[in-house]
Each structure stands twice: as C-alpha cells, then as structure tokens.
Image (spheres, grey):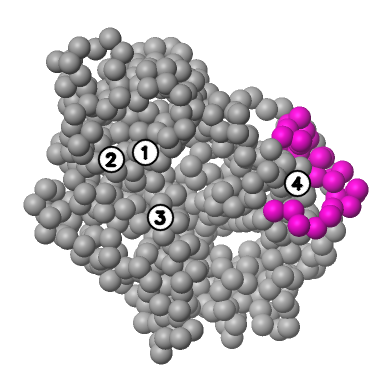
Amino acid sequence: MGNLHLDQITQFLFCLDNLSLSYRAKPVLRAINWNWRTGEHWAVVGGNGAGKSSLAAVLSGEQTHFSGRFDKGPCLDDGTTAFVCFERGRRLCERDRKLDCAEFESDARDAGTRVRDLVYDLDALRTRFPELVPKLDLERLLDRGLRFLSTGEMRKTLLANALLNEPELLILDSPLDGLDRSTQAVLKHALEDIMATCPAVLMLCRDLEDLPNACTHLLILHEGRVVAAGPRDAVLAKPEVSRILEPPQLQFQPRPLTYDIATAPDHTPTIALDGVTVFFGDLCVFRDLHWRFERGQHCLIAGPNGSGKSTLLDLLTGDNHKAYGQPVSLFGQRRGSGESIWEIKARFGRVDARMQNAMPSGSTVLDVVCSGFFDSLGLYDRPSDRQRSLARQWLESLDLAAQASAEFATLSFGLQRLVLLARAMVKEPPILLLDEATLNLDAGHRRLFLTAVDHLIDAGHTQLLFVSHTAADRPRCINQLLEFEPGPEGSSVRVTNL
C-alpha cells in the first residue's frame, strides 16, 4: 500500500495507487490516486463520461482488469461492498419480463419477483435503521412485483436490499436521478440517516446540488482524471471545479426540412381523448381524461413517479391495448379502426434514457441515426444513399457531423443523447416524444439538450410531447401543460394551455 506503515493502514478503508482502466483500448480512468480514511463519507462528482461508474465498478469488484494498485484496509477486506445502481434494477426487470408466465395464469398476471423477495427481513432493517422502513414506505410495497414499481419505489427497494447485507462500504450511483421532487426529498432525508449509521458511504453525483450534507469529502473527476480531492469545503473553493462541470459548446446549424409522412388536416386535433379511464385489474391508473392536442401545440406531461404518465404514452404509441374501445383519436383517426401498431409508431420519433444501453455494440453514430428510418434499435436494413445523406444533415444540424464515423459507445453520455435526438428526428415525425429524455444528464448537458430540442422544433412542423417529473425542467417551446395528480381512486389530469 505505497509507503504507508502498518499502523497507518488500519486507518484506511482503501488506497488507490496510480489506478488506470481502459475499455477497448480507450482510457476511462487515468492514474487515480485516492486514500479513504475510516469515518469519512465521500462523493465522486463529475459530468457525463467523467468515469464515475467505472471507478465504482472497480471499488465494488465488478471490474478487475485495471492497472495500478487497489489495496483494501482490514475492515473492507473482511466486509462487504454494496453497489446500488439503476442498471441492477433494469436487469432484474428484464429477467422478469423474459420469465413472464402471465398467459398461463388464471388472472393473466404474473407479479414476478416481489419486493419482499429482496427486502426479506424488515425487522433487521428496523433494528439498524428504525426510521427507514416508514420513511421509505416499504411495508406497502412488499407484495408488488418489481416490474410494477415506479423509479422511486425501485430505488427504495434496492437500497433496502443493500442495507440488509450490512456493508462496510455502500456505493450509491446517482440515487436521486429520475425521481420527482417529493420522492427526492424523502430519499435525501433517508440518505442522511443512512450516513449516520453506515461505516462508509460513497455517492456518485453529476451535480453539486445533489450532495447530501453528510458527505464530508469530494473527489472531482473529469475525463477519467482526478481534478481535486479532499475535504468538501476545500474542494468546492477551487475555481477549476465549477469550470469542468460545464458541457462542451456546440454550434447548432440549420436543420434539413423534408416532410415524408402525411399529416391530418390542420383543423383536426393531432390527439383527442374524450373521457379516457384506464384500469389494471382493480387499480385505477387515471380516470376521465379529456385532452385536445391541437396543431402547433407542444405539451409538457408532468407528474410524480407512478402517476400514470408512462401508461398514457403506451396508450398513444400502441404499446398498451387499453386504448381499444375507448374514445382515443390520433391524427384524425379513431384508435382500433384498422391501423397497425407499426403505422402508429411510424408517426412518433422517440427518445428515452434506456435507448443508450440498447444500441448494439460496435454501432457507429451514423448507423444509430439511420436506424431511426426503420424504428429499430440497431441498423438491420441497408439505408439508401438519400437516407444516409439526410442522417448526416441531421448530425450536422446538432454540430455532430465530425462524430459520424465514431463508435456510438465511445461518445460521452451527453453527446449520445443528442445523437438519439437526431435519430428520432431523421424521419421528420409529426410527434417527437421525449420520455424523461434528460434523465441521467448533468445540469450542463440538460441545458444543452433542451436548447437542441428548441432548435429543432422551432424550424419545423413536428409537435413535441415532453415527459418529466417536474414542470420546471422543460424546453422553451412548451405551450401546453398536462399534469397528473395522484389520488386514492387513480390520478386526475389537469390540462392547461399556456
């Protein structure tokens, strides 16, 4: 462990000495030196692509092919490290979907893995964290299947599961991402309680505003290198810290204008719902929704986790059969009047955070954009010369033409999201659907993404549906607000033209 003496080693949780890591010959961590003393709580802060998740993968033991040294102190050598991240929840849900046997069940419903299967000992949690069980409302969730949890409920479940193992080091990867403000507030208070009890907690954060008060030390990462590390106040006082958290400056160019997909007459609402109510079994998701989405409108769909936003989107895009038999019209045509799901999907360009991980390995940026012509995650059809030319023009409009031949996975997280925006727009859809499209972006890249959306919407005929937990983070073009308000008998929905 470097030049540390034996008595000093016992004071350390771990020491990293010149640790480096590369993926496919691309460096992601560069000569990291970091000593963590027992009794400290750290946060690793950096923008998208800084190397935070790679560093956590090394610390948790998920990544072992690194150079340099990773020496653990006695308590970490004998104890456990728990890593709570969005990716684990996604893997659990995907596994349950593959094993879904609902078609063989009498009630056509397979709950799959339930919360109680992961949070198996509430009494143990109450002993160590007496306020945590009521604060996270875990009792209510025990019989819920993981696939039917909101983002916030999944985070609470994974956090409780990790704490049951009594880890010596608890690593939390952006635990507040994708949560509505009320759930964020609950989880922030829970994190303060956890840090007062757990031996060591490491937070991975994109924004300084997400830091819990209990974090005593900060490590700032940028392009895989340590910019600053040490006590919280001393690090925050360094001028270079605020500079490196800013996103790259892009010069947007005029967008191509082609209109290949026929739209309804101007006097016909793009979307019309006349008193739609959705139930799943005995659970009412939302009730009596009346909504007119007229030509020229751009709508923000807002509401807390689990309020029904995703159900509404699936109903519109053909992924939910609950639209059939209900008064739902798209582009002047009543749903269920003979149109196919693929005809419906062809009218939507969509971006959500999950798409980034779904792109096949080795895809170039140009391939990803061209896949938008075929509504596929991955390019499996040969695009025409005209389609390739249009794809390049859309990349140029977002100042990404220089990255056309680059492998998609090598771009920073924020630039990948802009590439997905070009992919969604490449077929000039009547509706651009952005479903939590700023999720997992740091503050600077969120601003960049929203500016890019306004740039593309301003010069065309595409209408925007922008889905968010909060009404605060939105593009400038928004002129309609659709708000979900949860209630004991399902969410009510308020529509306001701005």
Q: CA distance from mark 2 to mark 3?
A: 17 Å
Find residue 203 and report its horizontal and vertical position in percent: 33, 35
N-term mark: 4 or 3 = 3
Mark 2 and mark 1 in contact? Answer it, CB < 8 Å: yes
Amino acid type of the residue that numbered disc 1 sits on in the rendered structure: Gly
Q: Nearer the viewer, residue 386 or 37?
A: 37
| Region in magenta | 378-406
Residue designated by label 4: 367
Q: Quadrant of residue 149?
A: bottom left
Q: Which mark is residue 61?
A: 1
Q: Residue at x 56, y 68 (%)?
A: 314
Find residue 450 and report its horizontal and vertical position in percent: 59, 40
Which callout, 3 or 1, points to the residue nearer the camera?
1
Residue designated by label 2: 81
Could one spot residue 434 in this view of the protein?
A: no
Residue designated by label 3: 89
127 to the left or right of 140: left
Amino acid type of the residue that numbered disc 2 sits on in the rendered structure: Thr
Amino acid type of the residue that numbered disc 3 sits on in the rendered structure: Gly
